[in-house]
Amino acid sequence: MLRVENLVVGRGAGPVARIERLTAAQGEAVLIVGPSGAGKTTALLALAGLAPIHGGQALLGGIDLTALDRRGRDRLRGSAMGFVFQDLHLVAGLSALDNVLLAPFAAGLEPDAPRAQALLDSMGLADLAHRPAERLSRGQAQRVAIARAMLLRPRLILADEPTASLDDQACETTLALLLQAARDTGAALVIATHDGRLRQRGLTVFETEPMS
Amino acid sequence: MTTWKLVIAFIRRRPLSWALHVVTLAIGLAVVLALVQVERAAQARLTRDLASVDLVVGAKGSPLQLVLSAVLQADAPTGNIPLAEAEKIARSPLVKLAVPVSMGDSYRGARIVGTTPDYLQIYGGKLASGRPWARPMEAVVGSEVARRLDLRIGKTFIGSHGLIDSGQQHDHAPYKVVGVLAPTGSVADRLILVDLASVWAVHGESEPPADDHAHHHHDAEQAAAPADRQVTALLIQYRSPMGAVTLPARVRAIPDLQAAAPPVEMARLFSLLGPGLELLRALGAVLLVLAAAGFLVGLIGAVGQRRRDIALLRALGMSARQVFLLLTTEALLLGLAGGVLGVAGARLLVFLGAGLTAPSLGGAGLAQPPMGVADLLTVAAALGLALMAAVAPAWIASRSDPAQDLSGAQA
């Protein structure tokens, strides 16, 4: 589903990292690893069309990500990709349910409130759907973020350091939720991490090479 | 999830800051709109009140005061003039209509004006009920007075000496309401009209000999013999424009009399008020500029505070154009709130101003204008200012680099 070859990604005008090869099939989870500053996050953002690609190839379900214009990248990101960030990025002032529904809103798609509620239910957040984001615990907020990434049944879920600064149990729970999300939606899951605990899970690992 | 929900969530994060900006905008708009409305209401009222009075003849003094007191019923009279002189002027062939007025008493803030039935002719006054006065101590009340003081036909009341309520009451001479005027939209609505003879009758008995009320001048006249009777002023309509050329000069030749042309005096009044009005307008404009600047600063601050939210929305597929629209929608919503509050504030200012000026305007302040184009233009101005203030911050937000804002220091 996702196939990357010799992808050079950057910030602004200059390239900062390269991924020689990366593939992830439907429902499969892979890791992008590398030391801090090696361009892991930049690689994820480039796959999402938010950071420039300076060379190479990236195909998502046959769509050449390097050939899309800005509008095309926005559309594809909104309709076919889900994001889970290290810092969760829920919008304060909105409820958990509304944060999940931000995904179709931002993408200009019809909201599917029953599915959003069902996803929250499946993550044990049934009673917290209407609680403001700022009143959720970190674990609860992370589950909301994963539900949001799953809502539109994406083809690709991108997770940036989702387990950083979590204890072992929380790390285990988060990883299980992400893997479950990929299985449930049939999305390829790409996790950028420097968390050694994830490397022990037997997932396919790809590395970024810093270029500067 | 809707745009409004998201915008309101954003606004609610900085409620005090936005409340301050909205209130500043509302105050600026309210001052400007209230000034426009007061000027319009004042002009409309003056147009009606001055009606077709071409000349006012009264005792020497300030001509502006003479017009204000005798026509607009908004100031103390300048003095009295002999009835005989007034009648002589009235008989001039240059005069189409001459209406004597005699003031000095009031009832609960409403002036009692002794006059002739011709007074109603000036303002197109018609009786809504009852009949005209036929003998002394009968009164016809204006519509506003009837409503405010609940003066219905058959009711009696006692006038007080002077144009405010604190004067001595003429207990010996109660008036009886025999007619109520239909609304004319003019000064007649705010008056109690009686026969000249009523005023003389009221003062025909024991009155304080000294002029202990600075605002009246009729004490000595009315008790006097008919030959010495006086009136406060004479309102004149010319038979032809020629009247304007010769009559004022003829009046000025008579000792202790003056002639004042209402349009001239009103122009003088507005030229006196002009600098004050300009200052208030400038104040309103400054407030509007401050409000727009406040919006600009507030929105730039909001964009800075929301970089990660905006980056998130971009990551979720929102286009730069939509981010721009989201910010402008927020500004427009706040602008709308400012506009609506501004319109309400202007009405409050006009209401308060009406209350403050009512005593000097015969018991009824300037009327609240109906909702109209000026109100809509005010809301439109608020939206325009908000939009202008929003363009730069919205552009900054739409051009921000989501990758930078999402990853922070990571690379």
Image (cartoon, rainbow, N blue to C red):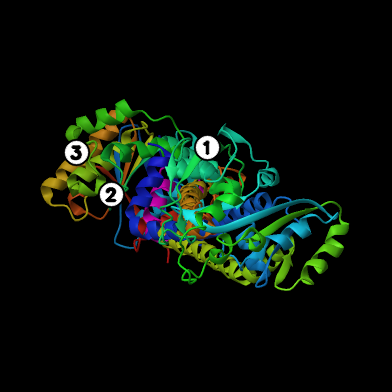
Whichever of callouts 2 and 3 sits on the residue coming sooner in the sequence is 2
Quarter of the image where the C terminus of chain A is located:
bottom left
Magenta highlight on residue B323: no
Q: Quadrant of residue A114?
A: top left
Q: Which mark is residue A88?
A: 2
Mark 3 — residue? A176
Q: Quadrant of the N terminus of chain A?
A: top left
Identity of the residue drawn at 39% across and 30% down: A111
Kindly identify the amino acid type of the residue bearing the numbered disc 2. Leu
Left or right position of B330 against B278: left
Q: Which residue is mark 1?
A: B178
* Residue at the extreme top of the image, as rendered: A114
Contact, mark 2 vs mark 3 (Cβ under 8 Å): no
Q: Do callouts 2 and 3 point to residues on the same chain? A: yes
Q: Magenta part of the protein: which range?
A: B304-320
* Chain of the residue that carries numbered disc 2 in the rendered image: A
| B70 and B168: which is toward the camera | B168
Name the chain letter of the residue that bears numbered label 3.
A
Check the image and name the residue furthest to the left.
Answer: A169
Secondary element at tag 3? helix
Q: Secondary structure at mark 1?
A: strand
